[in-house]
Image (spheres, rainbow, N blue to C red):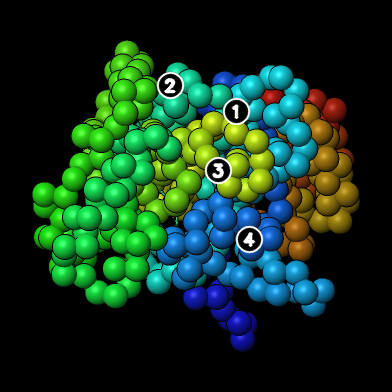
């Protein structure tokens, strides 16, 4: 152990478990790559104002959880707490929306940082795969994204998750609702912080998890009753498209989510095996965000799925992913000449695309065979002086123990044949 440890609220991904994380990222992105989404990568930090304006001045993410700092050059930056604002910033900066080919569909995968109180499923450094469809107002696009997330989770073998769906209205009907909600909330017994929230962002009060607040919320005006005809029709179409696709969802009138930029469709994927940190992913429509960060009107929709919590969900359901062993063939040289010859064979096997490893460090036979078994390899290539004198290596099947001599120039073909 060194003097140092991973910072509080973070953890390291180490083999062999790290392979599950890679597989999860791969599984979440596969449906996106299959549906016209192009890969985007943005910096790990941005101008702090982008998040303040984009995510919302009154949100917990911006007020409490952001890793914000000033550089030596005087720039005010923040480690990214989420992906949407950065992706939209990058798309606008590169004028991706101007090619006339809307929506611009992008996917990303990366690390995000929030100064949260760490607990199982909640970390200060976590990983998301996300998707954004920028510049189109079409219920089919909202439905597409929800269907693709559902497909991703199902392809991983997850079953115990639910999709919660809501509409937050638009700039026509939300202000009317907001005013009605504020009037209701101002009549409650709330602490000063919550009162301030009533003034700045009353919808967030509906999201309050404290029992003292929750019990006062019964009878609060429901957003669904205030939706304008256009929002109602839009939401109904999203619901119909999901139903037609066979994707089950639950209407949840209280789903507001922790970010300010959402309009109309909002949704969350929750997993029932995760305890309090049950949201494995979430997203929604953010028609006003582009204008909030100085761009043109670009109605958009997106989601982000948490990789860490998806891995926890797999564990909760007892799902083990079928991840092929990293190594298929393990080479064990006995003596100097064998080292040289077998190392050449290893290189040739790797060039042929066969995952191969080598007993480095001059291990004896016993130790080397132990390493071969631990590597998960199906075959070992063993050679000593006598084999080399005969121009062969021993190909040992580590499952059956069966061993055959193979001429040096036939190793790649024979290994390929044996592995099938
Ligand atoms: P959000 O942008 O807060 O809706 O986050 C989207 C998803 O990212 C969540 O559903 C979680 O799976 C994941 N996530 C967000 N914050 C954290 C965190 N602090 N630790 C681990 N996962 C997180």
Instruction: Decide: few, some or many residues near mark 3? Use Cα within 10 Å; few <14, some 14-19, many ≥20.
Output: many
Q: Residue at the location (16% across, 64% down)?
A: 188
- The foreground one among 175 and 316 is 175
Disc nearest the viewer among 2 and 3: 3
Residue 163 visible in the current orientation: no
Instruction: Decide: few, some or many residues near mark 4? Use Cα within 10 Å; few <14, some 14-19, many ≥20.
Output: some
The circle on residue 139 is: 2
Q: What's the CA distance linking mark 1 and mark 3?
A: 11 Å
The quarter in which the C terminus is drawn is top right
**Mark 4 or mark 3, earlier in chain:** 4
**Mark 4 or mark 2, earlier in chain:** 4
Q: What's the CA distance linking mark 4 and mark 2?
A: 31 Å
Task: Give the image quarter of residue 13.
Answer: bottom right
Rendered location of residue 191, percent (x, y):
24, 74
Numbered disc 2: secondary structure: helix
Q: What residue does disc 4 label?
A: 49
Rendered location of residue 310, percent (x, y):
41, 46
Residue 348 visible in the current orientation: yes
Q: What's the CA distance linking mark 2 and mark 1?
A: 13 Å
Taking the image as shown, residue 214 lies to the left or right of residue 352, namely: left
Task: Give the image quarter of residue 131.
Answer: top right
Q: What residue does disc 1 label?
A: 135
**Mark 1 or mark 3, earlier in chain:** 1
The quarter in which the N terminus is drawn is bottom right
Taking the image as shown, residue 270 lies to the left or right of residue 62, namely: left
Q: What residue does disc 3 label?
A: 289
Disc 4, disc 1: CB below 8 Å?
no
Rendered location of residue 295, percent (x, y):
66, 40
């Amino acid at each position: 152990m060194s003097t140092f440890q991973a910072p509080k609220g973070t953890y390291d991904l180490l083999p062999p478990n790290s392979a599950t994380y890679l597989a999860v990222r791969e599984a979440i992105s596969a449906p996106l790559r299959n549906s016209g989404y192009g890969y985007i990568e943005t910096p790990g930090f941005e101008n702090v104002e982008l998040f303040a304006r984009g995510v919302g001045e009154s949100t917990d993410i911006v007020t409490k959880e952001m890793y914000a700092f000033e550089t030596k050059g005087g720039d005010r930056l923040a480690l990214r707490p989420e992906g949407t604002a950065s992706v939209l910033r990058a798309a606008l900066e590169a004028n991706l929306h101007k090619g006339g080919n809307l929506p611009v569909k992008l996917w990303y995968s990366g690390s995000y940082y929030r100064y949260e109180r760490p607990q199982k499923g909640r970390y200060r450094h976590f990983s998301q795969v996300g998707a954004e469809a920028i510049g189109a107002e079409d219920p089919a696009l909202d439905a597409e994204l929800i269907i693709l997330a559902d497909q991703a989770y199902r392809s991983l073998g997850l079953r115990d998750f639910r999709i919660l769906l809501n509409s937050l209205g638009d700039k026509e009907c939300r202000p009317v609702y907001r005013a009605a909600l504020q009037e209701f909330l101002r009549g409650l017994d709330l602490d000063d912080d919550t009162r301030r929230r009533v003034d700045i962002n009353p919808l967030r009060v509906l999201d309050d998890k404290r029992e003292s607040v929750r019990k006062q919320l019964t009878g609060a005006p429901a957003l669904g009753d205030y939706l304008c005809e256009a929002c109602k029709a839009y939401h109904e179409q999203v619901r119909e498209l999901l139903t037609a696709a066979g994707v089950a969802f639950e209407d949840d009138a209280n789903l507001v989510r922790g970010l300010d930029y959402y309009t109309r469709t909002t949704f969350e994927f929750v997993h029932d095996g995760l305890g309090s940190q049950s949201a494995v992913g979430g997203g929604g429509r953010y028609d006003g965000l582009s204008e909030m960060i100085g761009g043109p009107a670009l109605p958009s929709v997106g989601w982000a799925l948490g990789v860490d919590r998806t891995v926890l969900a797999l564990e909760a359901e007892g799902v083990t992913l079928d991840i092929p062993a990293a190594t298929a063939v393990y080479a064990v040289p006995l003596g100097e000449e064998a080292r040289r010859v077998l190392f050449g064979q290893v290189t040739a096997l790797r060039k042929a695309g066969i995952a191969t490893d080598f007993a480095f460090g001059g291990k004896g036979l016993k130790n080397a065979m132990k390493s071969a078994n631990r590597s998960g390899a199906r075959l070992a290539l063993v050679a000593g002086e006598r084999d080399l004198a005969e121009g062969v290596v021993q190909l040992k099947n580590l499952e059956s123990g069966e061993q055959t001599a193979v001429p040096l120039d036939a190793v790649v073909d024979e290994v390929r044949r044996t592995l099938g």
